[in-house]
Image: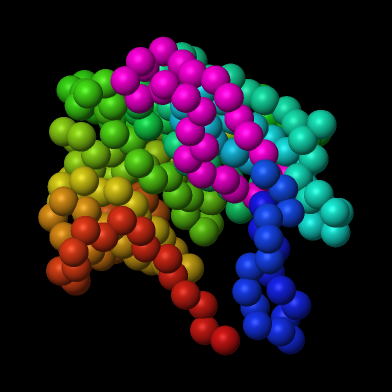
Amino acid sequence: YFSFDKPDSSGELLPATQIITHTGTSANKKIQTQSHVHSTFFSPDEKYLFVCDLGNDTLYQYPFDATAAKPVDELHVRTYKVPSGFGPRHLAFTPDGKYAYLLNELDAKIIAYKLDNDSLTSLQTIVSTNVEDTVDGDKGAAAIRISPDGKFLYASNRGNANDIAIFKIDADGTLTDVAHIKTDKHPRDFNISPNGKYLVVTSRDNNSIKVYTIDQQTGLLTYNGQSVNIPKPVSVIFATKN
């Protein structure tokens, strides 16, 4: 964990405030040979830091206090084990903070959780990809996002699928499979515009970024003809105007 210098100074990163080390392995003996923190996410209220450890099949929930000398509370961490070989990769929360969805890279499954009383309760496990072929034991689930209105969840699948999976978020937080929309090869990341109208996909192995229009009623995607060629794109972020 790093902090920034004072706002009226240079803005540089200060030395690390904390270094937290995970250990462990899991079932995939080629990929899960050691702990591998793939990503971290704050809860919507910023009370917790969630950590996806792909290497040991664990989702960590650390209490967080930005004003503390050590902001991440290691002593009161909660851990959520996923089935062996799943490989937790990315996490997404609904806008109201009631539900969280964990995308698992290796087995291409999404686990839906309810966030209640500051802990997660598993509601459902659903398949992200409709393609069974694996590549070196990795089905290639990549990124996960939720529409700003909280109605739909999207997940990208690489490997032999190369698509965006679309799910409806039901009132109880569970997911209903809507469709799978083909993309260019290796959709490593995608993002949804702040107004919820567009979904932008970065396809690493096609050197392409493409824009899809989102149907606000069905959640379906339509390629609108807008694209950019760029070498090996792996992430897309929308900047806000000051």
Q: Please state, as top left, top right, bottom left or bottom right, where the C terminus lies in the image.
A: bottom right
Horizontally, residue 76 falls left or right of residue 142, namely right
- Residue closest to the eye, 54 or 44: 54
Q: Quadrant of residue 6?
A: bottom right
On screen, residue 76 above or below 148: above
Horizontally, residue 47 falls left or right of residue 193, namely right
- Residue closest to the eye, 149 or 65: 65
- Residue closest to the eye, 115 or 185: 185
Question: Residue 42: x and y, percent?
Answer: 65, 50
Q: Residue at x 67, y 44 (%)?
A: 19
Question: Residue 201: x and y, percent?
Answer: 28, 57
Task: Say whether residue 223 is visible.
Answer: no
Question: Residue 60: x and y, percent?
Answer: 64, 32
Query: Which colouring convention does the figure follow?
Result: rainbow
Region of the chain picked out in magenta, as a range = 20-49
Horizontally, residue 54 falls left or right of residue 69, namely left
On screen, residue 49 above or below 120: below
Q: Residue furthest front?
A: 15
Question: Residue 155: x and y, percent?
Answer: 37, 42
Q: Main secondary structure of the magenta part?
A: loop
On screen, residue 28 above or below 227: above
Q: Residue at x 65, y 78 (%)?
A: 11
Q: Residue at x 59, y 39 (%)?
A: 51
Task: Say whether residue 242 is visible.
Answer: yes
Q: Quadrant of residue 154?
A: top left
Horizontally, residue 226 falls left or right of residue 99, namely left
- Counting labels gives 0
Indicate whether residue 46 is drawn in magenta.
Answer: yes
Q: Residue at x 63, y 74 (%)?
A: 12
Indicate whether residue 216 is drawn in magenta.
Answer: no
